Amino acid sequence: MLMRALDTLHVSAVGPDIILAGQTFEIADNDGEILRQRGLAEPVEKQPDAPKPARTRTK
């Protein structure tokens, strides 16, 4: 689950560094839901995939 921190966090499952408010991070769905319920982070809607570049011919 992709989440955005609403406050400064330290989540050892994510990494050794702190997560600043506004940063996004990946976390397991159940752990992300706990952070959402506590008001510490919010889910980030996935952006649609960027258009793929046109295929180019190689010689």
Image (tube, grey):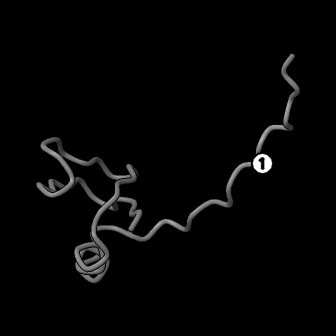
Q: SS of the residue at dot 1? A: loop
**For residue 49, which quarter of the picture?**
bottom right
- Residue nearest the viewer, comparing 50 with 34: 50
Q: In the picture, which quadrant includes the N terminus?
A: bottom left
User: Residue 56's x, y, as percent?
Assistant: 86, 29
The residue lying furthest to the front in this view is 59
Mark 1: which amino acid?
Pro
Q: In the picture, which quadrant includes the C terminus?
A: top right
Q: Residue at x 18, y 45 (%)?
A: 18
**Image-based side of 40 in relation to 12, left or right:** right
User: Residue 28's x, y, as percent?
Assistant: 27, 69
Q: Residue at x 57, y 64 (%)?
A: 46
Task: Using the image, determine if residue 23 lies above or below residue 2.
Answer: above
Q: How many marks?
A: 1
User: Residue 57's x, y, as percent?
Assistant: 88, 26
The residue lying furthest to the bottom in this view is 37
**Image-based side of 28 in relation to 55, left or right:** left
- Which residue is identified by label 1? 51
Task: Using the image, determine if residue 35 lies above or below residue 12.
Answer: below
The residue lying furthest to the top in this view is 59
Q: Residue at x 21, y 53 (%)?
A: 14
